[in-house]
Image (spheres, helix red, strand yellow):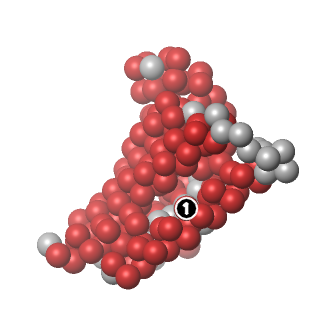
Amino acid sequence: MAELFMLFVATMLVNNFVLVQFLGLCPFMGVSNRLDTSLSMALATTFVLTFSATLSHIIYHTLLLPMHLEYLQIITFIVVIASLVQAAEFLMRALSPLMYQVLGIYLPLITTNCAVLGVALLSVREFSSLLETIVFAIAASLGFSLVLILFSAIRERLSASNIPEAFAGTPIHLITAGLMSMAFMGFAGLS
């Protein structure tokens, strides 16, 4: 149990996929303008990332590995991810049409989010246990969500601040993301 907790903390904070491993930067920068949009994107990505890593692990260990078809893992995982994104789109359109419109193009882009594919690939390479994969996927998705929501809150605050013209817009966002990355790297002593 302690090992699973350490895996959770290490994945969520120490090896955060966005700020430490630099995966998933497109939605991190693109959707983080407003807090409500970031929350919706975080929920959709959490759903897709967690279930895609779990399903990918099951498919890999029950079909691809026994049949010696490991070379099909990337194609298989992309199909799983795309199917889950379609399910998330369908659910969001049914449950919250307004949020579905607000997310716009970013919702289908979860399919190409390299963090989602990266978690699926890393989980089958690193973990033989389904429980470890689930903990890893949940921690990675919560870490992504945490960073996305924090960055969104900071960006909303920055939009109301008096920032010098040379730093306004993208420069201050990149500086802020760099400072957040350095702060998250400070968690390295925890593992």
The amino acid pointed to by label 1 is Met
Label 1: which secondary element? helix
Residue 46 percent across, percent down from the top left: 41, 47
Residue lying at 55% horizontally and 54% vertically, measured from the top left? 78
The answer to whether residue 31 of the structure is visible from this angle is no
Front-lying residue, 93 or 33 = 33
Task: Residue at 60% x, 64% y: name it.
Answer: 179
x%, y% of residue 185? 49, 74
Say which of 75 and 164 sits in front. 164
Residue 143 vs residue 44, the one in the foreground:
143
Q: Position of residue 67 (x, y in %)?
A: 41, 72
The answer to whether residue 150 is above or below residue 6 is: above
- Could you tell whether 28 is left or right of 127 in the image? right
Read off the residue under disc 1: 180
Query: Which residue is at the far right?
Result: 166
Quadrant of the image for the N terminus?
bottom left
